[in-house]
Image: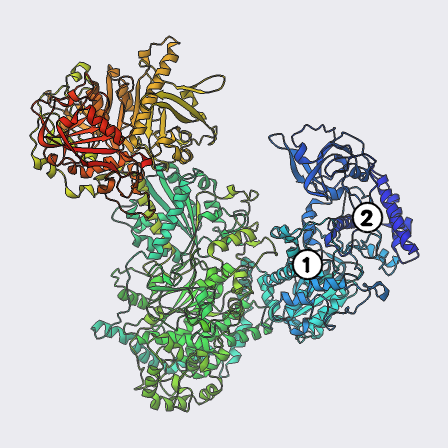
Amino acid sequence: MLAFSLCFVSFSLLFEMGNSYAGQLKTTRFEEVLHNSIEASLRSNNLVPRPIFSQLYLEAEQQLSSLEGSRADNEEEEEEEEEEGSESSSPPLSYQMKPPPEGCCTTDGFCQAGKDLRLVSISNEHIEVPSGFLLVGAKSPNLPDHLLVCAVDKRFLPDDNGRNALLGFSGNCVGCGKKGFCYFTEFSNHINLKLTTQPKKQKHLKYYLVRNAQGTLTKGSVICWKGAEFRGRQSSSSTCSSTLFQLPESSGLSGSTSSEPPPAANPSAPAGTQQTAAAIDHIPPTAVFGSAVYNGKESPKQQLVKNNLSALTRPSVLGTLTNSGPPKKRHKGWSPESPSSTETWNMQLNPQVPNRIKNDGGSLSSLPHSALVGPASSPMVGSGEPVSVPDNLLKICKAKPVIFKGHGNFPYLCGNISDVIVSPLLHTCYRNSQSLSRAYEQYGASTIQPISEEMQLLLTVYYLVQLASDQVPLIEDLEQIFMRSWRESHLSEIRQYQQAIPQTFPQVPSQIAAVTSAQLPWLAGLAASSCNDSVHIIECSYSLAEGLSEMFKLLIEGKLIKTNYVVIICANRNRAIDSCIVITGKYQARVLSESMLTPSDYQKEVNYQLVTGKVETLGSFFSTLCPEGDIDLLLEKFYQENQGHISSSLSASVNKPTALHETGAAACTSYEIERHQIRPFQLAVAQKLLSHICSIADSSTQNLDLGSFEKIDFLICVPPSEVTYQQTLFHLWHSGILLELGLEKEHLTKQRVEQYVMKLDAEAQIKFKVFLQNSMQNPHTLFVLIHDHAHWDLMSAMHSLYPQTELSTGLVDRLLNCREVKEAPNIVTLHVTSFPYALQTQHTHISPYNEIHWPSSYSNGVDLYHENKKYFGLSEFIESTLSGHSIPLLRYDSSFEAMVMALGKRFPRLHSAVIRTFVLIQHYSAAMMAVCGLSQMKNYTSVETLEITQNLINSSRQCPSGHGLMVVLRIPCTPLAAVAYERLYNVRERLALEDNFEIILGNPNSGITIGKHFVEQLKVWQKIEDVDWRPQTYLELEGLPCILIFSGMDPQGESLPRSLRYCDLRLINSSSLVRTTLEQELGLAAYFVSSEIHTEKPVVNDVLESDPEKLSSTDNEDEEIATEGSTSEKRSPMKRERSCSHDSASSSLSSKASVTAFCSESSPPLIAAGDTAKSPHQVLSNSAEETTNNYEKQKQKVDKGAQTTISKHLPLVTEQLDTKQNIKSAQISITSSSSSPFSSSSSSSAPAHNSFILQTSQCSMTKASKQPPIVFLPKLVYDIITSTDSSGLPKSSSLLPYHSVMWASSFRPLMSKMMTCTEQSLYYRQWTVPKPIHMDYNNRNEGRMDTFHPRRLLLSGPPQVCNKNKIGKTGAYLQFLSILSRMLIRLTEVDVYDEEEININIKEESDQYYHQPGDMWPDLETFKKMPFDYTIHDPKYEDASLICSKLQTINSEDRSMSRRQEDMYTRRQTTRMRLSKYAAYNTYHHCEQCHQYMGFNPRYQLYESTLHAFAFSYSMLGEEIQLHFIIPKSKEHHFVFSQPGRQLESMRLPLVTDKSEDYIKSPTFTPTTGRHEHGLFNLYHAMDGASHLHVLVVKEYEMAIYKKYWPNHIMLVLPSIFNSAGVGAAHFLIKELSYHNLELERNRQEELGIKPQDIWPFIVISDDSCVMWNAVEVDCSGDRKSDYMWTERNVSLKQILQHIEATPNVTHYALIGMRKWSSKTNSAEIKEPFSCCHVHDFIMLNVDLTQNVQYNQNRFTCDDVDFNLRVHSAGLLISRFNHFSVMKKQIAVGGQRSFHVKSKVSDTPVSISPAQYICAPDSKHTFLAAPAQLLLEKYLQYHSHRFFPLSVKNYSHPVLSVDCYLNLGPQIAVCYMSSRPHSLNISSSGLTFSGLLLYLCDSFVVASFLKKFHFLKGATLCVICQDRNSLRQTVVRLELEDEWQFRLRDEFQTANAKEDRPLFFLTGRHI
């Protein structure tokens, strides 16, 4: 205890000594070394201290740097230990602060002087900061949510790199101003931090403080202590605290020397194994022990048990980071666990060996947090003594060992280094796995430590142990294991952190148990002991060099023959572990070494081996296989012996169908040439694309102005594959899109079509330059740049993995990402791909909102698109491999794989691609020979290859027309493909099969070449008469029996025909696998099959709980795949067994049957197991009706003959099948009455008459098109595809998505099996980053949204085999172009009303014309003589009552006949008009010219508008009217404001005498409701840019929405009492406001010396649907005055208004209007250029003259007619300019349609007829929720005949309407009379009325006025008043009872509740 006390005192002294150097930079090493020596002596168990002067003078500078780096890192650890006390394994160091001076303030957040230091309190105060000081924020443990403001000398703070901070402290208190604190301890006391641990500036000074734009002090960046570049990695690179289970101190055991496991629930299992088992599937149960240990932390129960145990920690692990900064003030000693100081000294002589330092602070239980900080640049460099690689290593071992660097240092290799491969991949994986992702920082980086190095290595060993001998380790698997281990080990901490409750005192953390470096070799050896020496562990005591040397020695001695993996561990106690893993398994080493080759190196290697003749040894080896000699000799011998026989028999069989076809005896009808048609799928995708384009255009970013484009042009970019290029041309030609878009004329030529498709090759730049020039020259054309197969070339133009000779590499980046394309506002780029993953990275150009995914065909079991085809994609192929399905569509060939593996060991220097290709060529050659009768060759091929070959050869013989199957043989390497083609072509010739099937070499750089015979066949099938025709696409090969050797490193978008039956992918490069590569290879087999015919027991029966296709781009975001089948049979994907019929060892019945399909040479060839030989595979491929019963019938027919024949020919094979056949694997039970098991499967293969028996006439091609192809894969790929990860997804989905991207972090979550395409995209966008070679690498701007290109879209859809009708993405985007073009045309067109004027026949015919046709303005005196035309001619009032002006003799039939009965219910007549450049627009129009007009000028922010109240009194309303103006800042110059308070005073008005070309004098008011989006308020183009004042008049409840859509428009907001009012109220207030403003302006300008009459008195009142204006130009140059020509053209509104405003004596006119446009306008209507009649829709109103004439504020309909009549009766002039017309757009929303009459009682929408709008007073009628005036007007319009029965169709006796015009319906005429004195009325003499209408009579209507009129006997009267009292008073006042008879039952009211103030009616009859 004395020693311990001394140690603690001395250590405390060291702290004080460190602080004593505050403010001074230590310049001598002596003091530092002295401190080190004192501390080491105090800590060390050794009595001899380390010599001070030896240490001082003998240590090299580099060692000094290493030591300082170690100290720096260890100090950082200790800092974190104290920060993270609650998570550490022991209590924090106790610290007692000095008691505060008496009487001072001790409140948290205040200094001892009582001044507030909290940032939130003093952020706005001025704080004086001395020069050289910075404001920083300090964290107080008692105020976690606050920062305390401090002023600190910046010399004592670190720089940006976390370095160069002076030791000590110098600071000031910003509260009380006290200065000169030289100790942080003293300062922390002053600011009341109240610490329980030693004060440290690194712990508590957290943030710099900065002032923002408003001058407020805010939290800035984090103060980066101890190395910024490693700070972020500190949590990532630090190892988990790794201690043994702590033992009681009295036990005497040392944790560092004990090599035995501590006591646990299961003594046989070590600590840390549980998490390993949790992280890896398939761990042997013996490796798991009872209690759970989570990455060194025990479960909660264990923690309670172990809390009383003290800690014995292992040494910390430190890196080799050097530190160039000043020495730190606190120094660490050496671990007491060092054997001796001499050993420690020797270790330090090697600067590469990290230093271990004990990090406890003087107490027994130390804080176990430690950090591994490695060099910033990656892979470890070699160090220590070199290791010599033995000579002839490759020759002896038959493989190049692959050495993966692991942890720590790696030695130099010398000698025969060409025979080994060293990779940093595993080292990178380890390093990345220690990077805590940002996604997990929410749990607190200080709480959760990364996985330890020891645990990483142990997990790796367990992973290798569970790998099978034919499996290869995947980095993705290892990363996921680390991820799961880390998450599970910290699950409890994460939960505790999330549910943490703040406590006053931190609770004592529980103890931790983890794997230590001492335990590691033993645990690894224990794990490897159960794997039959597959994994060998080598433990080193000093360095990896000795382990590597031992490994090489064992290899040379042949002692590692059974070993696939050697794990070398150097776990010295005193430093970090070193490790590496050597792959010694021949298969694994070959695969891994080949996977490291780039595509370029891969091709070079293969080419080199072919050119140099290294493959000749392989050929000679094949020659020795055949006992009868070389295969070529056999072929030649066979050819010579059987030339005549075979050629005759085969040619007969081949030519026979053709002869039959020509004679018409038999012909195959299955060959369909489908017409081009658009599928529902394609239309849905096209509409999605269009929707996204519209969204871009509608967004506020103004990135696409669709309204400015007149047409569409496009360019399709395709990969440099000739077949893909021709395929796209074919689709484009047959789509008709070029004609539809108007880009080409009727007679298309191929040369013209080629202008729209660009092959991305060397010549692409020329064509692309033309495209760019066209886009710049045609700004009003929208160019769509379509990048098809967009994942193909994503290389950056600056980098390339491919040979420089390939000019196309990086071409996409150079062209599509060029500045011209990015900046062109009229280019939209559409990327189209089946594999979008590489375009979905953190740096992508494409916004996630601009992605379009292919829709799913089913949702909840409902067929969405009614397709008759079902898509078979990756998930369906995987599904077919599960047990429960009849035929696996994915298979592998085990015999082929076994032969390849054997040859790989025999020829280690040959690339596996060469070996695989030569073996497969051999198999195909032998299979063709075997089918042709060389039965001995069946032993030299595989069952799978034999099945393919014989089905191919037999296929054309089953069809009368010779249709056959296609076999795709995928050989990525072009030179190998050429070798295969040459060999197979030669074999085919020797076997005389050249007319039976074709062999085609599919090279991406060249076209298709096939024989003349087959060309003629294709021309016959496709009915082509062109002599020079040749197939140019694979689709045109439909029905041709052929082997297509498909070459090229990657498919480039080529589509395959429906006759594809086998897709042989056994040669794809399986060593370098990424998701895109894998899926695009399998995409070749993707297929549409007819959904009507259920083939092969389709894989829809028992779908996975979540379809794996969710991850292959065929889903829709909001749709799920429905599962079918019995629920009782549903099983978890993990539990489902795979069918065991996928390889030749246990292959399906058809494969076994095919082995038997050989004849002896003595008999003609018997082809038995093709499509004619109905094996279970083929039986099941037929229609679903072929059940076991059919099978039995067929079997019985041929049993007798077939049994003996087959037994006779193949006795050995039938015996073989007795043991191997597995009928159950084919999921069909076949009962056989025969003793031979083969009889049931060969029922249709009996020979007869030396020819082939065609059991069915069904064409092979037809069957192939009804079922997906069968795919053969390499075993390695098959395992990856068919295995699933823990989420139930195929393992392929967790692979790296693309070569040129990388994972952002190893700590990424697993993909979910329920992920939609959108979620999958977001996953890749978060977790992948492009490599420098990727074209998106430089597209980064710190994650901001502006990295997305606004006009770039991505369409992803499944890979699929296109038919000739273009099922697929090509058809979808061509359809998109079509509907986009139609939409653009539609955008430039509007539906305008096109109706003839009504009541023309009533118009007074007169020969007198008051003006000449060419007169520009009316003559005032002449105009005064013109009579007023009372008749309404506007066609919108066709249903309105006729206004009689004199005694008219109108035929009662005229009026009714002019109307059609259904007019009331049909749409009004419209016509479509193209918008001119002078049109008015709605909110959807965005163009550059009107940005400022619409408020998008950056000078004016959208919110910069002000609300102004404007009040005036109006006596008629009896109260003051208060209106509100919303005035944008940009429009304030139109108004006058008072200077002191900026109160709105008036709206500026010009003078009558003002003249300006660029100014419109009349303010325009547009009342509107419900049309915030569709109202035509953008008058910028209509006004031709002229300055004008435009005011929108809106209701109060719509103010916000109108302001949102029209931020730069002035708004006049009506009072809330008018929220339910009609258009009359708006017109009324506009007019009254305008007159009041006129008076204000007159008063204001009168003070300026301007006469009142000189102020401009006109305003414009415009409807919100006026879209264009026209002017008639009259040519009067004829000989006679009456002769004239006229034309009508569109003009600007500016021109029209300025013309009208320039009218002579214009102020004498009260109303000026214009015609409504009609295409049927005739010369008579415009011969008189001016009319005195009604004006509507667009009027200029003189508010001065009409001062005493008001609009009726109550009106909803016909208020303009009513106002016109009032104006005329007042003796004012109304002029209509007939040479001007306005077009009105049909708008389907808003306006009067916004008023709906509904019941006030029920919310349910019930149709209420107008007859119910009125009721008897005091009745129980249902009240309606509608204004009383609206009910009145609607009722009178439809049911006025009930009030005026005598008036119906009685036009000569109209209804007298006093002072108002109400629409009584079209069958009743009215006569308007004004009661005002001196008013103009028609003469009523001789006129007898059939009724009298008195509406809200005022005092001007008196009894004497009414007695002047005469009424028919029985005429009816209708009096309408506001209430019943007024009704009675009116009857009395007007003495109506003298001439009219009233009854009580004739009183009515509108159907309103009392509170809604109904209107009351009284009717009576004339006496």
Residue at the spot of label 2: 64
User: Is residue 623 left or right of 1020 when viewed as pictured?
Assistant: right
Q: Is residue 1147 above or below residue 916?
A: below
Q: Amino acid at mark 1?
A: Ile
- Marks 2 and 1: which is nearer the front? 1
Q: Is residue 95 above or below residue 1003?
A: above
Residue at the spot of label 1: 451
Instruction: Tell me the SS state at disc 1.
Output: loop
N-terminal of the pair, mark 2 or mark 1, is 2
Q: Position of residue 212 (x, y in %)?
A: 62, 32
Q: Quadrant of residue 240?
A: bottom right
Q: Position of residue 563 (x, y in %)?
A: 66, 73
- Going 38% across and 88% down the picture, which residue do you hit? 1162
Q: Nearer the viewer, residue 1855 or 1518?
A: 1518
Q: Amino acid at mark 2?
A: Leu
Q: Position of residue 1686 (x, y in %)?
A: 17, 27
